[in-house]
Amino acid sequence: MKGFTLVELIVSVAILSFIVIATTSLFSAGHDVFETSSGSLDMQRLIRQSVGGMAQELRQSSRSDIVIAGDGSTIECRIPTAIDPLTKSDTISYRLVNNQLVREHPAGTQKVLALNIDSLTFSLDDAVLSIQVQARVRMHKREVSFTIQERVTLRS
């Protein structure tokens, strides 16, 4: 009589189970890496856009129009009238509030530009403003962090 013994069947099922578990684990790990990378790239893109918009507005100011808080975490700039002659508030401010990058303009009106921000630092050297943003988020059991720096040459 031809056929498989019980031991051969158990070994075959064990080997097949091992292969299925290994394959599933690889697909799951690959999916997690993809989701983490995708989420990280989306977050970086959003923060880069926010910092780019901030830099564009700040670039319109001169050194005398800018006030940076003592710890470098908040900046206020006067809006040149050529940009917004009808505005009721003459300043725009950027600051970190509860791990959120916040833009305030007009006074009392806040807009959240980015989330998961660890630190926001402004420094001014002559007519060059440096902006540094550090962000960190936990995605799929992995912590992703990065730093974005922007240098803005102010108008004279």
Image (cartoon, rainbow, N blue to C red):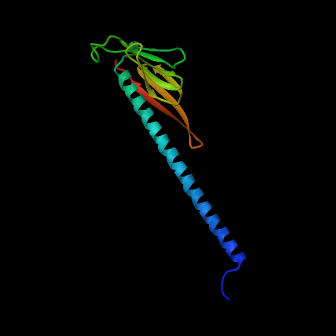
Occupied quadrant, residue 156 = top left
Q: For the view shown, which residue lies furthest in the front direction? A: 1
User: How many discs appear?
Assistant: 0
Residue at the (65%, 70%) spot, across then down = 13
The answer to which of 85 and 115 lies nearer the viewer is: 115
Residue 151, given in percent of the width and then of the height, sits at 43, 28
Occupied quadrant, residue 80 = top left
Residue 132, given in percent of the width and then of the height, sits at 49, 28
Q: For the view shown, which residue lies furthest in the bottom direction? A: 1
57 to 33, vertically: above or below: above
- Point out the image quarter for the N terminus: bottom right
Residue at the (51%, 20%) spot, across then down = 73
156 to 22, vertically: above or below: above
48 to 24, vertically: above or below: above
Residue 113, given in percent of the width and then of the height, sits at 43, 27
Residue at the (69%, 72%) spot, across then down = 11
The answer to which of 30 and 70 lies nearer the viewer is: 30
Occupied quadrant, residue 154 = top left
Residue at the (36%, 23%) spot, across then down = 57
The answer to which of 5 and 135 lies nearer the viewer is: 5
Left or right: where 38 falls relative to 144: left
Q: For the view shown, which residue lies furthest in the right direction? A: 7
